[in-house]
Amino acid sequence: MKYLLIFLFPLVINAQSNPSEKEVADKVSQLIKAMIDADENMLKSLTSDKLVYGHSLGAVEDKTAFVQNIVNGNSDFVTIDITDQTLTISGNAAIVRHKLYAKTNDKGKPGEVRLVIMQVWQRTKKDGEWKLLARQAVRPPQQ
């Protein structure tokens, strides 16, 4: 029995020190809600000051531009539905991939978008919170 406990002890410590996938999944859900609601404070709190936000047509925004484009309606999400989400955690980084379908109203023009998204989240040393560090969208191949 001693040997079993000694063997399992490192596994228990490792499991407790690994960040929770649920925490990251919750942050993804909060980000989606903040994007739909154009919630400036929530968008700022969920994103890293070093954010690199890549769009499917090649535009890349920093945190300030990303937040302002959501808040001012340049990027207006009416609905966002995600499917096929996967999440991989490695240390203080998490990679989230999913398919996104959204109804938009960018600059008052209704539209729809289908994208494949990859997000990189980082657990901060300062407060242990997960922040969106990078995001890249691509258009899925035509089927």
Image: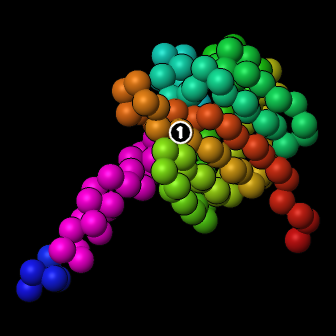
Q: Which residue is mark 1?
A: 122
- Magenta span covers which residues? 6-33
Query: Image quarter for residue 132?
Result: top right
Left or right side of 12 for 136? right
83 is higher (above) or lower (below) than 6: above
The residue that appears at 9% across and 81% down in the rendered structure is 2
Quadrant the N terminus occupies: bottom left
The residue that appears at 68% across and 15% down in the rendered structure is 64
- The type of residue carrying mark 1 is Gln
Indicate the position of residue 80 as horizontal and vertical percent values: 61, 45
Query: Image quarter for residue 97?
Result: bottom right
* Label 1 crowd (10 A; few <14 / some 14-19 / many >=20): many
Indicate the position of residue 110 as horizontal and vertical percent values: 78, 34
7 is higher (above) or lower (below) than 128: below
Q: In the rendered structure, does residue 32 fall within the stretch colored magenta?
A: yes
User: Viewer-proximal residue, 54 or 139?
Assistant: 54
Left or right side of 102 for 8? left
The residue that appears at 57% across and 26% down in the rendered structure is 48
Give the prevailing secondary structure in the magenta stretch. Answer: helix
Left or right side of 96 for 11? left
Indicate the position of residue 122 as horizontal and vertical percent values: 53, 39
Residue 119 is at least partly visible in this image: yes
